Every structure is written in structure tokens, then in C-alpha cells.
Image (tube, rainbow, N blue to C red):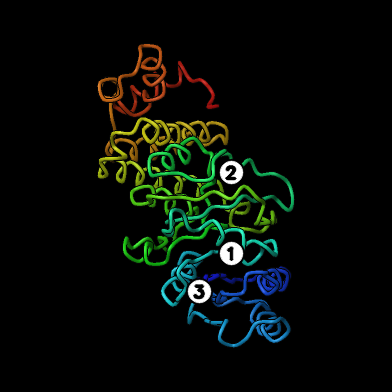
Amino acid sequence: MKVSVIIPIYNVQQYLEECIASVAVQTYRDFELIAVDDCSTDDSRHVLDSCLEKYPLNQAQVKNIRHERNRGLSAARNTGLQVSQGEYVFFLDSDDTISSDCLQLLVASSRRNEKDVDMVVGDYRFDGPELGCPHLRVGKPFLNRRQHIRAYCKEQIFPMAWNRLVRRDFLLKHQLFFEEGLIHEDTLWNFQMLQYVQTVSIVEHETYIYRVRRQSIQTSTSYEHHFRASAYITGRMADIMFSTPILRCNHNVYNFVEQEKLRHLDDCYRHNCPHLVRYLYTVCRTHPHYLPWQAILRFGLNFGTFKRILKRDMHYCKPFEEGLAIFDSHHIPFN
């Protein structure tokens, strides 16, 4: 079974060789490496060409692609997906590495009851300080559709695109491409998959090494840019939830989306940016949402939970000025 390893590349000359080397030494050999250079302005292109000559990768295993203009991480991943030919795709960021048995372990877990699963997810570790991102904490080797939804919403599965095998025909059938021009695009992509994923295998081994560096997108973006992207994604999550019956009726999904709204609201205050609250409020009001009494009827919530939801929702279920005044007087930190 062939795996397409897709590596988007942009200005990572000091990390790229280590990344390519970790793919070249995989114990599982039925893979293709798809390197997509998104018009790097440093020496990444030369480093890539040198690596492809230096390491044990035959010509049939490699697709070396260069964008004509810089289009961003999402576009580079999409380009790789469009030219891939493997049964499964595996996204690897160009400043990270994988263990030598990464593909072998994930592929070994890709079949259950003689059928290919939609997705295989492995665990990871940080190379650098922990960022507070969730690790793999599922505690079982296989998830059906509802179990996967619950595990994702309980943050037992991390929301990044990397370190998972995903069936290529599944992604193409459901048009699960990354939205271009968006940061934190992984979060939206993973939530979109909740609509369709039926079967997931779990590999509780640290097969991916995530490098934490100062100039990465994750750690260098200004707060306001980060906030607006996250608020937009939360609005899209609400749209997806309300348009998908299995998600619309799931209390775990409801709680997940509502907690995201509250987390962004709390971030506004912690970053001393109350001017952004109105933008978040607009997102919450203009996208579908349950009012507290609707939530209690749909999900059968007890009165204690209802009061908690009422506090959580007060920032958008009333006219803006009134809702904000109520929130200010009752604000409790997110946890």
C-alpha cells in the first residue's frame, strides 16, 4: 500500500535536511515523497535538491514541485494532495521530523476487519517547550464515527493535519482541501472531517517530532490576526454543525463549539483587546446557534448545566451592549 508523504516547503533551509532524512530512512518503503516549494526566498530549494541526491530515494519515489508564486501552507498541501497517487496521504511539516518506523506503525494499523480505515492517527512529542496542545489520549485502538466525534470534541485527539494517514480517495470524494489564505487551517480541516469519517485507528506511539521554533506561523503571528482567523473558524464550525444532522444533535459538538467561543472571548480580555469583542459577537450572532432554552430542550440538560450555559452564552444571546454589560459583571475565566 503506497503512502504519499506531502511536505510543504517555505524558508526552512536550516531544518529541511533533517526532515527529508527522516523520510528517507523509513523502514516502510512503499511511499512517494511529494515536496512542494512555495517559492522560498532562502536556500531551501538548493537544500532540497541536495537532499534528494544524497539520501536513498529513487526517482520514482519523488515528486519535486515548485509553485510559480507564494500561495501559503494550505495551497502547498492542496497541491501535494492533487498530484498524490498513494492510497493514503501523510502531511509532514518541513521543520519537523518523523521516527524511522512512523509509516510502518501507521500502515500496520490501517486495516480493520479486512477493510481500510478512513484515518490512522499517531502520537507526537515536542522538540522544544510544550505548547499546551492536546496529545493522543484516546485509550483504545479503534474508533467508530460517534467515538471519533466524542474523542475530538473532548480534545483527546490533536487538531493538527500532520501525523495521520488519511485515505486519499476519501479526501477527494468529500473535497476536503485546506482553505487557502487562512492560519490555523488544520483546525477547520479536522472539524470538517467530523462530518464524514467513519473509522479511525489509533497508534499510541510518538511517531512525529514537532519542532517548536520562534519564527513559525504558530508562534509569530500577531494576536489580532490570530484572533480573527480563530473567530472565523469558529463561525464555520457552527455552520458545519447546524448543516450536519449527526453533529447538530450531538451534545459533545455543541459544547466544543461553545467552549471555543468562550475561549476566544476570554482571550480578548487576557490580551487587553476588548475592541475585538464586537467582532466575535458578530460572528456568534450571524452564524447559527442555540439559545440556552433551545439547548436544554435538545440535549436534556439539567438545571445546573443550563445555568452554566446561560453564563457562557450571555455574550451573544442578547443585543450587543446589553450582552457585553452582563458578561462584564459576571465574567468567570475560561478553564
Q: Residue at x 37, y 66 (%)?
A: 169
Three-letter residue code for mark 1: Leu
| Neighbourhood count class around disc 1 (C-alpha, 10 Å): few under 14, some 14–19, many 20 upward | many
Residue 334 image point, x, y percent: 53, 27
Q: Is 102 displayed left or right of 286 in the figure? A: right
Residue 154 image point, x, y percent: 49, 35
User: Disc 2 versus disc 1: distance between alpha carbons?
Assistant: 17 Å
Disc with the residue nearer the chain's start (3 vs 1): 3
Three-letter residue code for mark 2: Leu
| Neighbourhood count class around disc 2 (C-alpha, 10 Å): few under 14, some 14–19, many 20 upward | many
Locate the C terminus and report the quarter of the image it occupies: top right
Three-letter residue code for mark 3: Asn
The correct choice, above or below, for 120 with respect to 97 in the image is: above
Q: Residue furthest front?
A: 113
Residue depth check, mark 2 versus mark 1: number of the one nearer the observer: 2
User: Quick one: SS at disc 3?
Assistant: loop
| Location of residue 106 by image quarter | bottom right
Instruction: Say which of 83 and 197 sits in front.
Output: 197
| Neighbourhood count class around disc 3 (C-alpha, 10 Å): few under 14, some 14–19, many 20 upward | some
Q: Quick check: marks 2 and 1 in contact, CB under 8 Å? A: no
Q: Residue at x 54, y 24 (%)?
A: 333
The correct choice, above or below, for 237 with respect to 164 in the image is: above
Q: Residue at x 64, y 61 (%)?
A: 102
Where is mark 1, residue-wise? 92
Q: Residue at x 68, y 75 (%)?
A: 24
Disc with the residue nearer the chain's start (3 vs 2): 3
User: Disc 3 versus disc 1: distance between alpha carbons?
Assistant: 19 Å
Where is mark 3, residue-wise? 70
User: Quick one: SS at disc 1?
Assistant: loop
Residue 100 image point, x, y percent: 70, 65
Where is mark 2, residue-wise? 136
Residue depth check, mark 3 versus mark 1: number of the one nearer the observer: 1
